Amino acid sequence: MEFKVSLAFLLILFLVILIADLLCSAAAALFGRSFSRVFLYGLFGLLIPLFLFGWGYFVGRNRYSINKIKIVSERVPSGFEGYKIVQISDIHLRSFAHRKRQLAKIVAAVDSLKPDVIMFTGDLVTADSREIRGFEKILSSLHAPEGVISILGNHDYCFYGKFASEEDRLESLSNVINSERRMGFRLLLNENYSILRGEDSISVIGVENISASRYFKSYGDLRKAMKGTADGFKILLTHDPSHWDNEVAGNYDIDLTLSGHTHAMQFSLFGWCPSRYIFKSYRGLYKYPVGKANAADGGILQYLYVNIGLGETALPIRVGTPPEITLITLSSSESGQTVLPG
């Protein structure tokens, strides 16, 4: 599948470059320049997609980044001052089929950050549960005092695999769920979990996939997932950031939402990313002021962080979008304790 998509991608780029070369050569000829000479020089442009693809395949997808952010909210309980969350997303194990060492390095990097909790925002697999075989030991070594809290992504429902029947697809989905639980993940399926520290607590809410796009089926139920949550700081795990844009921001007392899904389309060059034309929120930190115009005026900010994932789909490359580990530190004030390792 990846080979066919990659070939089609390169052929399209070659065609675009050839058309551009022909147009530029024709324009040059109108001003007395040699058509053939300009055209021949222009053919060097065909090396650009080959270079980008090669770099993205051999280098870009194998250099993970650790992004560190601080979430400031007066709603953070004192017992959670400096609390460290590591978010990972979109592992897509098929993309690590021949790179187990790379995934092991990423897991070791996560553990080295000494998080209080690890949150995984979906898409463990790309097509079906068979991708998990051989990775259980690696992923089971993810360690934090509060463990790993996870949700399902759109790919985890196994709609993109080849199955003889709907029953086989559902069995594959069940295998994904059971595998996560065997590896020690606390999988939230439209439910919530309270993390306790002394007399303080925060609520972690996990929904099944909810998307604004008809292309991605929605199964989540936020109201059901929030049922029974206590007043106070809340974190929502929802795979698709369009859910935050369409339902969460400004409508629920959820302080921090963590999402993935977009991969930033695995391509960004000089700050330009095609993902911005598809997703309103596609990468990094977003803020929504509640109550007043901004937090400085006494309002409260709702936050969304979109992690661009660890693995790949369709194209086995990453250009300007390195695999991401996110370290999030909670604080009740700007001057509060900051625990961001150097």
Image (cartoon, rainbow, N blue to C red):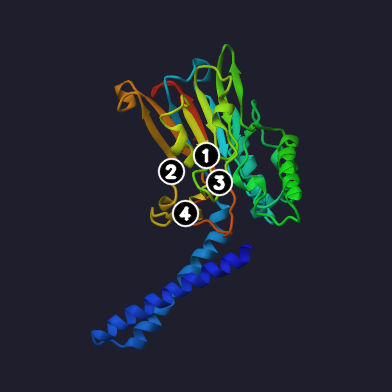
Residue labelled with disc 2: 281
- Label 4, secondary structure: give it: loop
> Helix, strand, or loop for circle 2?
loop
Which sits in the foreground, 62 or 253?
253
How far is disc 3 from disc 2 in space, using C-alphas? 14 Å
Q: Taking 340 as reference, is 325 above or below it?
A: below
The residue wearing badge 1 is 259
In this picture, residue 280 sits left or right of residue 180? left
Q: Which residue position is annotated with label 4? A: 320
User: At x 49% / y 71%, what residue is drawn?
Assistant: 12
Classed neighbour count for the residue bearing mark 3: other residues with Cα under 10 Å, few (<14), some (14–19), many (≥20): many
Residue 313 seen by the camera: yes
Q: Nearer the viewer, mark 3 or mark 4?
A: 3
- Which quarter shows the N terminus? bottom right
Residue 171 lies, in percent from the top left, at 76, 45
Name the side, left or right, on which 261 lies relative to 95: left
Confirm whether residue 341 shows in the render.
Answer: no
Q: Amino acid at mark 4?
A: Gly
Q: At which x and y percent is residue 195?
A: 60, 21
Nearer the N terminus, badge 4 or badge 1?
1
Packing grade of label 1 (10 A; few <14, some 14-19, many >=20) is: many
